[in-house]
Amino acid sequence: MVSIKLGMLHYVIDHVYGAFMHRTKITPPFFSRGWGGPNLELLERMVQRLFPLEVQGQNWPPPLVRPVWRTVWETKTATLREGVFQTPCADELTAALPPESRTARVAWLVPKNVPPQKMACVVHLAGTGDHTYDRRLRLGGPLVKQNIATMVLESPFYGQRRPFLQRGARLLCVSDLLLLGRATIEESRSLIHWLDTEEGFGKMGVCGLSMGGVHASMVGSLHPTPVATLPFLSPHSAVVAFCEGILKYGTAWEALREELAAQKITMTLDEVRERMRNVLSLTDVTRFPIPKNPDAVIFVAATDDGYIPKHSVLELQKAWPGSEVRWVTGGHVSSFLLHNDEFRRAIVDGLDRVEWKESW
């Protein structure tokens, strides 16, 4: 009885937080400027290119990036550097990104006095609204003692890469969400490739919370070599977040309908929501290839998540046989705050299931 009451409390906290963040006028809704262009057919072709249903070239190495680094601080045991590099996306995608998002930024916390071939490094991807390095550095920082480096990528449309007209994390157009995802995937894969071929790290992994977990799943799926893949509190698709979860209350459905009406396409709000579901279904990770090492995939999900229903987590586990789901007691918000130790344990265990590079 106590556990049921606690579960309900966590669920209620998610909804109270969601109501405050997404139903008030404090911040604008997501996609207040519509779908992203006057021609919906162009948008659909763009989405198909961003997330193709038949992923080819999974074994192709990603483009190599060469970050330019500066040292932020240094102690006896670790060094924190920050780096910049040009996004490795293809020219067409780069041109579609806002100018502010075309230069990628990354922080890198590395143990000292350990050869790279004896270290692992995990790329941490941003959840919705995570504009800085701080939270992810706090998550990865204690792992320095276990010879695990942390690399934190600043997402396009976030932080210093945020477009001038965008307020906070509220993306202006649906196409921005898809561009953010594709650029994050390309940049992450290129960073892992750089860690492998240029720095010689012995193991690599990728993790992320919420939206970052979706992107981590995609990176783990598409990378040509085995990596630990660690999605935390994340759905199998953006459909879940924007069409089923609390974020549906923070979406500018009327603006989306009005843009269609301006193109002489008449839809009810329910039909607009179905249109959104169809567009975002192309982000469904269950359509992506099974990772090279599925037993190094560990999902950490919350028992009473008001944003991510249990069925969404289980769908991805079913699609990737050999992967593991771990449950923490709490909701989306409380687990985000209280279960960092469980996230770190999953990172360590996932890396333990990846062979050292020298034995490939």
Image (tube, rainbow, N blue to C red):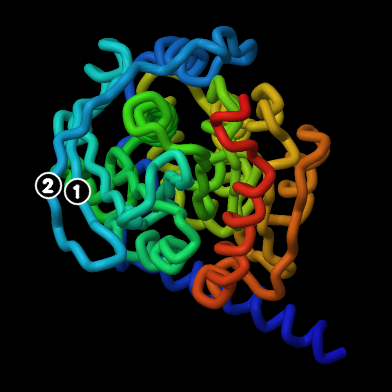
How far apart in space, not on screen, are marks 2 and 1 (Cα)?
6 Å
Residue name at image x 32 percent, y 42 percent: 155
Residue 280 at x, y percent in the picture: 56, 31
Label 2 CA crowd tier, 10 Å (few <14, some 14–19, many 20+): few
Any mark on residue 264, and which? Answer: none
Residue situated in front as seen by the camera: 47 or 63: 63
Kindly identify the amino acid type of the residue bearing the numbered disc 2: Arg
Residue name at image x 55 percent, y 77 percent: 338
Residue 230 at x, y percent in the picture: 59, 48
Residue at the limit of the structure toward the right, as seen here = 1
Q: Tag 2, which secondary structure?
A: strand
Residue situated in front as seen by the camera: 293 or 21: 293
Q: Are marks 2 and 1 in contact (CB under 8 Å)?
A: yes
Q: Quadrant of the C terminus?
A: top right
Task: Let me know if residue 137 appears in the view.
Answer: yes
Kindly identify the amino acid type of the residue bearing the numbered disc 1: Glu
Label 1 CA crowd tier, 10 Å (few <14, some 14–19, many 20+): many
Residue situated in front as seen by the camera: 32 or 153: 153
Residue placed under numbered mark 2 in the picture: 70
Whichever of labels 2 and 1 marks the residue nearer the N terminus, that label is 2
Count the marks: how many?
A: 2
Q: Viewed as shown, does residue 333 lie left or right of 142?
A: right
Residue name at image x 54 percent, y 47 percent: 213
Residue name at image x 14 percent, y 52 percent: 71
Residue placed under numbered mark 1 in the picture: 82
Residue at the limit of the structure toward the bottom, as seen here = 2
Residue situated in front as seen by the camera: 144 or 20: 144
- 287 over 239 or under it: above or below: above
Residue 184 at x, y percent in the picture: 39, 34
Q: Tag 1, which secondary structure?
A: strand
Task: Let me know if residue 23 appears in the view.
Answer: no
Q: Quadrant of the N terminus?
A: bottom right
